[in-house]
Amino acid sequence: MNYKQHLEHPIFDIISKAAQELNLECYVIGGFVRDILLERDHKKDIDIVAVGSGIELALKVSELIPFHPKVQVFKNYGTAMLRYDDIDVEFVGARKESYSHDSRNPLVENGTLKDDQERRDLTINALAFSLNLDNFGDLLDPFNGVSDLEHKIIKTPLNPDITYSDDPLRMMRAIRFATQLNFQIEDESLEAISRNKERISIISGERIVDELHKILASEKPSVGFILLYKTGLLDIILPELTALNNVEEVEGHTHKNNFYHTLEVVDNICPNTDDVWLRWSALLHDIGKAPTKRFSKKQGWTFHGHEFLGGKMVKKIFERLHMPLNHKMKFVQKMVMMSSRPIVLAEDIVTDSAVRRLVFDAGEDVENLMILCEADITTKNSKKFQKYHNNFKIVRTKIVEVEEKDRVRVFQPPISGEQIMELFDLKPCREIGQLKEAVKEAILEGEIQNEYEAALAFVLEKAKKMGLERV
């Protein structure tokens, strides 16, 4: 079939002309082609494979574009990239690859288009459109990728054991595409992932996390995480999560399956936000439950302190997977450590002081915390479900009221340490810290308003009891 109508953007004619001048064959390959055939929004990036030098083709394309866009050359990989009309175009020479057992970096040699298609991870990513003058727009599909698209099948072009063992990241990509596209992984391919799961150990944490991000950003992340679990990959990547899939019974008492509960929470959060770090928070919010699980005859199953321990575990996970140890990690830690706070408020009578403390501790992240906690309601009892959501509405209303009145979300003390030092002619000392802490507590408890005059009167009274005299 011919798909010339999808190649009307000027960049394709320019590439075709450049290839003619160099006497090269060239093709559009991969995701751009796949997404056109699926009638999905195609990404603003295009992969071009040349039978010859991809770098040379990129330089010629830049030469033919009037403003001569800069070409980034990656000699080690034999690739080049340029940007034209908000489109990133990557060029690579057709190649065949061979792998050693301890690395996903292949030995590369020049090859044909078929060689290049064979090295692709999936049949649906090996599809190509010709940009050559004699068959411009023709589809080249040597592995029946179109049929796999029609039947929603994920499979590899060659023997899946070889494909996955050569580059184990392809196992993650197969699961990610199955999740994003709502496709089924072919049985033989799925079994090959299980057989080759240990090979994932040669993949860097950054590469693994990039795939996890894309799974978390999909419409229903649980699909991907269940596949990761069933194939054994999740136990290698995130054993803290799989440890939650252990339901025990003692004297007739059981507890919920916190693994599948977690996946429900992650799914619940997706429609509300596009922030992947909030989804990470949902994924890790209960990881402290496995190590803190205890049974007592009085209380049954308990998980005391799981939020605090879970927050500490977050850092270890981020370090192990080479994830950012900056404000993003601190955000996830905060969400995990505070994940039960609004739930406790929703169960009890909501007091102003409790809400003030919640807003003070959560700060600018209070809305994200509320989204997480509402997603955490996975009960199948419709009355309980409605009750919790109604209670959360009350908590939200209280947050607005308290914030308007007391402004504690981004708390700034109404009276500073320097002002206290001047009032009592003090040098830096413990008493100043005690007075500032007392003012903060008085505001959070609702004893005084969050404003200077009230704070000054409070400090003078408190200082008098401490034996300090105003100068």
Image (tube, helix red, strand yellow):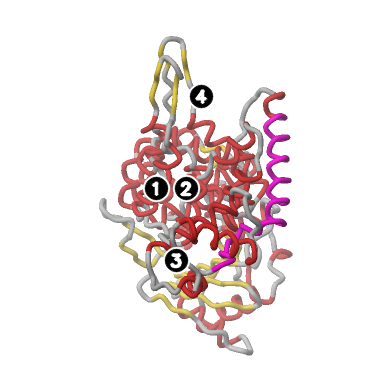
Q: Do the residues under discs 2 and 4 have CB atoms within 8 angstroms?
A: no
In the rendered structure, which disc, 3 or 4, sits on the residue that comes first in sequence?
A: 3
Residue occupied by mark 3: 94
From which residue to which does the magenta span run? Answer: 386-415
- 457 lies left or right of 207: right
Q: Do the residues under discs 1 and 2 have CB atoms within 8 angstroms?
A: yes
Res. 66 image quadrant: bottom right
In the rendered structure, which disc, 1 or 2, sits on the residue that comes first in sequence?
A: 2
Residue type pointed to by label 2: Pro
Q: Is 18 rendered above or below residue 387?
A: below
Q: Is 153 rendered above or below residue 360?
A: above
- 22 lies left or right of 196: right
Neighbours of disc 1 within 10 Å: few (<14), some (14-19), many (20+): many
Q: Look at discs 3 and 1 and give the one toward the viewer.
A: 1
Which residue is rendered at x = 35% and y = 59% of the image?
A: 97
Which residue is rendered at x = 54% and y = 36% of the image?
A: 263
Q: Is residue 189 at all visible to an observer of this figure?
A: no
Residue occupied by mark 4: 256
Neighbours of disc 4 within 10 Å: few (<14), some (14-19), many (20+): few
Neighbours of disc 3 within 10 Å: few (<14), some (14-19), many (20+): many
Give the CA distance from mark 2 to mark 3: 16 Å
- 399 lies left or right of 123: right
In the rendered structure, which disc, 3 or 1, sits on the residue that comes first in sequence?
A: 3
Q: Which of 435 and 234 is in front in this view?
A: 435
Q: Residue 80: give x, y in percent of width and height.
A: 47, 75
- 50 lies left or right of 387: left
In the rendered structure, which disc, 2 or 3, sits on the residue that comes first in sequence?
A: 3
